[in-house]
Amino acid sequence: MKALRALIIGAGMLLVWQAIVSLTGVAHYILPGPLRVVRAFVANVDLLLAHAAVTGAEIILGLLLGCILGCVSAILVASFPPARRWLLPVLVVSQAIPVFALAPVLVLWLGYGLLSKVAMATLIIYFPVTAAFLDGLRRTEPGWLDLAHTMGGSRARVLRHIRIPAALPALSSGIRVATAVAPIGAVVGEWVGSSAGLGYFMLQSNARLHVDAMFAAMLLLAVMAVTLYFSVDIALRLALPWQAEDTGSTPQGSD
Amino acid sequence: MSHRSEGLQPQPYRADKITRASSVHLRAANLDYAGAPIFDALDLTLPAGQTTCLLGPSGVGKTSLLRLIAGLLPDADGKVTDDRGQGISGQIAYLAQQDLLLPWLSALDNVTFGNRLRGESAGTEAKTQARGLLAQVGLAGREGDRPAKLSGGMRQRVALARTLMEDRPIVLMDEPFSSLDAITRYELQALAAECLAGRTVLLVTHDPLEALRLGHQVLVMAGTPARLEAPLVPTGQPPRDPADAGLLALQAELLKRLTRAKMDHAP
């Protein structure tokens, strides 16, 4: 049913798109119809896939790096409370600077290749992962900590056996958000300066008024992003089977 | 009495497991909350190997007193010692109103959780012991289930098994049965009394009948700052039969004391 609904919505949007193009008679270099885009896709399929591989690698490497750095920072901040005071302002400032403004500098420093785009994606992913995981680590059910205290657990073991596992659902929401924004980082990097990738291809096509090819690249990017998101979503669900079934703890004490 | 969904079989009590429980002495407890004194030089002794039940109006400080004894109130003053004058951390087990089971662990792993938290072995030997305890609380066959698959009563049974696994001479319980339905509560009271016999137990509760069923002595806490009245001492060994005439008479007396305590507590 869900798949059918998605199909109907997709088909409906394509129809509206084609209708606008046919009825207004707009020039194909302003708004190409869906058929024209499909033809452009087929004509450029090898080139598109080659560029897509580059962008895909940038996104996945950025995602991995951003998640690892985010997790490490969150655990560090959670285990050494003074680190919170030092690191949190850095975190907030890192988000206050728009990534778009940083992109040219990163290209200048790291070159036109893969590295500057991975750095860009990492930067954009780092914050949601750190913030979500840190939030989860700081919101451990107080009753569990009381229990751990009476059981005689060291800080490190409480972190490892209670706080980190308890924060995994929060981390997984952070990773979901990160997965959704990761392609933005990579593509912005490609727009600013690159020699390969779907962003580079779109920029080139646009400059030559090959708007149909640009749309084809855009659609491919969208398909990649959606596939990545759902793969990550399913993987996270499988990794945390207890999250979906947990109906919450019994009510809070009253006294 | 056909409503015994979580069948209760009496299990032999393993007296060999317990080193002689000590009394617990709380001296000169002081605690302020928002500028008002909750405790002012409060003293309390939990007699060795007995269950002490603590009742009182909401907000009078019952839970605070239990937490103070558990070492969970760093801001409070007061000396908590055993008979030898030593501190009691490392001798206590804690059972709260919430079962506090970890949702990502199976029932069995929840029971052995203390071992892992202390970096001790949670291997075959510990697992065998945990299986035995789960069987003792009537959960044989449910070892692999995560808490979400268990009913509220079953979860509190797992929590009880975890408490028994800790095998501490002093057990502090904060309304452990209050979120359960009447029949499940009735069954679990008997089970807990049986499993925890011989230990020094403090049970904070709202339920006068529960206190009279399970307590060797029953204390009412009242006033600001809180004071403890002279204990009520029901006759016979817990768990007592709730139909016992003497117990019902004591319940009337206890309700009277609680009503007075509540009037006392109201501003």
Image: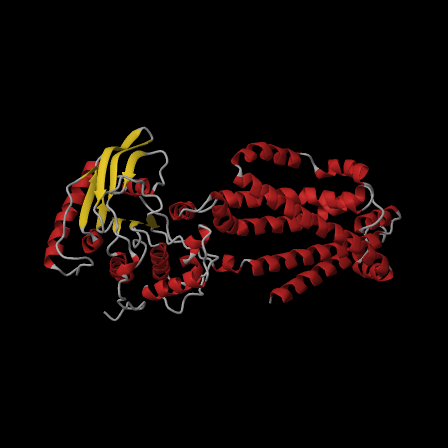
Question: Who's the residue at 17% across and 57% down the image?
Answer: B237
- Where residue A145 appears, as percent x and y from the top left, is 42, 45
Is residue A92 or residue B142 the one in the foreground? B142
Residue A209 visible (yes or no): yes
Farthest bottom residue in view: B2
Residue A124 location, quadrant: top right
Residue A188 location, quadrant: top right
Residue A222 left/right relative to B112: right
Residue B182 visible (yes or no): no
Residue A254 left/right relative to A124: left
Residue A186 left/right relative to B132: right
Position above or below: B154 against A85: below
Residue B248 left/right relative to B62: left
Residue B142 location, quadrant: bottom left
Question: Who's the residue at 26% across and 58% down the image?
Answer: B189
> Which quarter of the rendered picture does the C terminus of chain A lie within?
top left
Is residue A181 or residue B139 the one in the foreground? B139
> Which quarter of the rendered picture does the N terminus of chain A lie within?
bottom right
Position above or below: B7 against B56: below
Question: Who's the residue at 77% across and 43% down the image?
Answer: A116
- Where residue A48 appears, as percent x and y from the top left, is 82, 57
Q: How is the image coloured?
A: secondary structure
- Where residue A226 appears, as percent x and y from the top left, is 68, 56
Is residue B3 or residue B150 the one in the foreground? B150
Position above or below: B42 against A48: above
